[in-house]
Each structure stands twice: as C-alpha cells, then as structure tokens.
Amino acid sequence: MNQSESMISPGPTPAAIASAVAAKGVNHIGIAVRSLDAQRAFYEGVLGARFESVEEVRSQKVRVAFYALGPIDNPVRLELLEPTSPESPIAQFIEKRGEGLHHVAYTVTDIAGRLTALHQAGVRLIDEYPRAGAHGSLIAFLHPKASNGVLTELCEPRRNANGHAA
Ligand code: ZN
C-alpha cells in the first residue's frame, strides 16, 4: 500500500451504498470463457439451461451468450463472455485468472442517477457513466476494490413501450 492509498478515508457507510444502488434483484451472473461453442455441452447438456441468444458487444470486444434457468417469466440468467480480441477486458481476465466467474449484475432503475450517487458517496467506479450492454440495456461496472473483489455490474434493462423491462 502506498502513502496516498493509506490516507484514503474509511469510505461510505453500508447504508449510503444500499440507498445509492437500491438493487431490485440479480440480473445475471457473468462467466468468462474462451469459447462459447465449447460451453454449450455443459450449460445445456449438464445444467439443462435454456440457450437464449448470442450477441456481439463491440464496446467490450466480446461475444455474449445468454442462458436461462428456472421459471420462463422470471428466470435466472447466465451471461457467458467470449473475447473477440486479445485487448478485450475478458481476454485479459482469462489470461490472468483463467476461465470462470467474472461478475454479478444487479438490476437497477435510473442507472445514471445511481452512478452519480455512488460517485458522490466515494464509491470507486470503473464507469462513471452508463454504456450500452447486451439486449439494449444500460450497464456500468463498480471497481472490484469497491465491492471486495467481486466485480459488480449495474444493469438497467431496456424498457418496452409499456414501460416494462424488456
Ligand atoms: Zn454482465
């Protein structure tokens, strides 16, 4: 720890963080993989998860496959992330730590407002502003040091014409 780090204030209280994020639930669990194709046998064949879609998220240099488990109307989702370039953050993650659990994403409303509140509360962020995620969602990552080593994503699902999450 260098001198500037040791002088950082204790940080926000748990209550301040809870009110800043106000997570509505777990949106998905992100898993870093070398190859989406190589994972199908496990997620479909072994776990019995339902394959939903594959999409490329260019901002992150990844291809993303979604699998769903459980009730059709309220499933648990897994997001498998395959790097499309060695510069992808996912490629760098796999290089350092191997394939495996990458992040947990929480559903929020008003993601831009949440990020402002977190920033004001002194929570370290990777993204101070929301960016485009899969399925037209808006996403942002907290810094892993702000969440005790678990990379944490906030996710605001795209709304359909009725104002419901798509
Ligand atoms: Zn994610």
Image: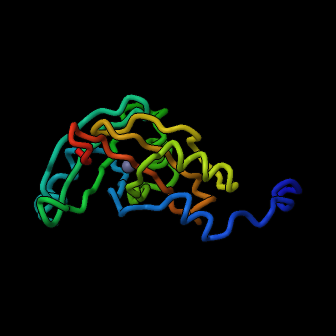
5 sits to left or right of 120: right
Q: Residue at x 40, y 32 (%)?
A: 61
Residue extending farthest top: 58
166 sits to left or right of 6: left
Residue extending farthest right: 3
> Where is residue 133, by image quadrant?
top left
> Where is residue 15, by image quadrant?
bottom right
Choose between 52 and 32: the one closer to the eye.
52
Image quadrant holding the C terminus, namely top left
Residue extending farthest front: 162
Image quadrant holding the N terminus, namely bottom right
Q: Give the x, y percent position of residue 11.
A: 73, 63
Q: Residue at x 49, y 38 (%)?
A: 130
Q: Give the x, y percent position of residue 111.
A: 47, 46
Q: Residue at x 65, y 49 (%)?
A: 119
Choose between 143 and 80: the one closer to the eye.
143
Q: How is this picture coloured?
A: rainbow
57 lies above or below 108: above
35 sits to left or right of 3: left
Q: Give the x, y percent position of residue 63.
A: 30, 37
Choose between 123 and 89: the one closer to the eye.
123
76 sits to left or right of 48: right
Q: Give the x, y percent position of residue 106.
A: 40, 58
Q: Residue at x 54, y 66 (%)?
A: 18
Choose between 76 and 91: the one closer to the eye.
76
129 lies above or below 153: above
Please tell me how many numbered marks the rendered image carries: 0
